[in-house]
Amino acid sequence: MEILGREAVSMDVGARLRSLREERGVSMRALARRSGLSANALSMIERGLTSPSVSTLHKLSGALEVPITAFFREEPPRNRIVFCAASDRVRIPLVKGVWEGLGGESFTGRMEPFMITVETGGSSGPYGMIHTGHEFVFCLRGSLEYDVDNQQFILQAGDSLLFAANLNHRWRNPGKTVANAIIVLAGFEETERPSEFHFSPLPAGEKQNGDSEPGEGASKDQESDSDGEF
């Protein structure tokens, strides 16, 4: 059964950007200053005339002080039973990979499963994370390195890892091929969105090599391939 190569739903990122900006009372010019992007580029994104790159989204999330997931979700209704077809998964780009929701964003309980696809050198970021609850990881393909409480674990396809999420932890793909893993977060505080700790932000205003603003030669994701290390 093919689960990794199917298309997932996309969101109107431009409309979400406009909504988030207006909710916070931030003008287009102010957001341009904070993010290091031009007002013209922001206008094109909001009007749906161009698609922002992943690093552009990270600059905007930093400037608006929201997680990158905020551009891809509106608060969905919560249900006690959630069926999530492969074609309906919410799909969010990471700096070097993709996050895909597996229904937890619509579930009433304190459990959130999701799948990550991580390119070589991709990681959860340079710093560790701590959140409430527990974390379960199952490696589907490739290699994923987890650092938990200063202990390193290399997960290969079929390996799993379970730990208390209040231990400092982070992950990266140290291999030479793409890695896929399912991560399940459970037992966290109701006010927390622990999956959002698993995104690697770029400082606002920082450009990756080869990345340009929308409207200036780049309308699709263009990311550098420098390897990351813990």
Image (cartoon, rainbow, N blue to C red):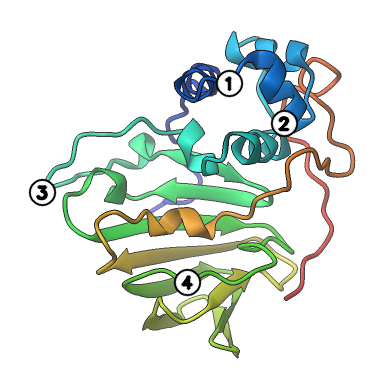
Looking at marks 4 and 3 on the same chain, the residue that comes earlier in the sequence is marked by 3
Rounded to the nearest whole Å, what is the CA distance between mark 1 and mark 3? 37 Å
Residue 172 shown left or right of residue 1 in the figure: right
Q: Which residue is mark 2?
A: 34
Looking at marks 2 and 1 on the same chain, the residue that comes earlier in the sequence is marked by 1
Residue 215 shown left or right of residue 130 in the figure: right
Rounded to the nearest whole Å, what is the CA distance between mark 2 and mark 4? 28 Å
Label 2: state its secondary structure: helix
Label 1: state its secondary structure: loop
How many numbered callouts? 4
CB atoms at circles 2 and 1 under 8 Å apart?
yes
For badge 4, the amino acid type reads: Ile
For badge 3, the amino acid type reads: Arg
Residue 88 location, quadrant: top left
Looking at marks 1 and 4 on the same chain, the residue that comes earlier in the sequence is marked by 1
CB atoms at circles 4 and 3 under 8 Å apart?
no
Q: Which residue is mark 4?
A: 130
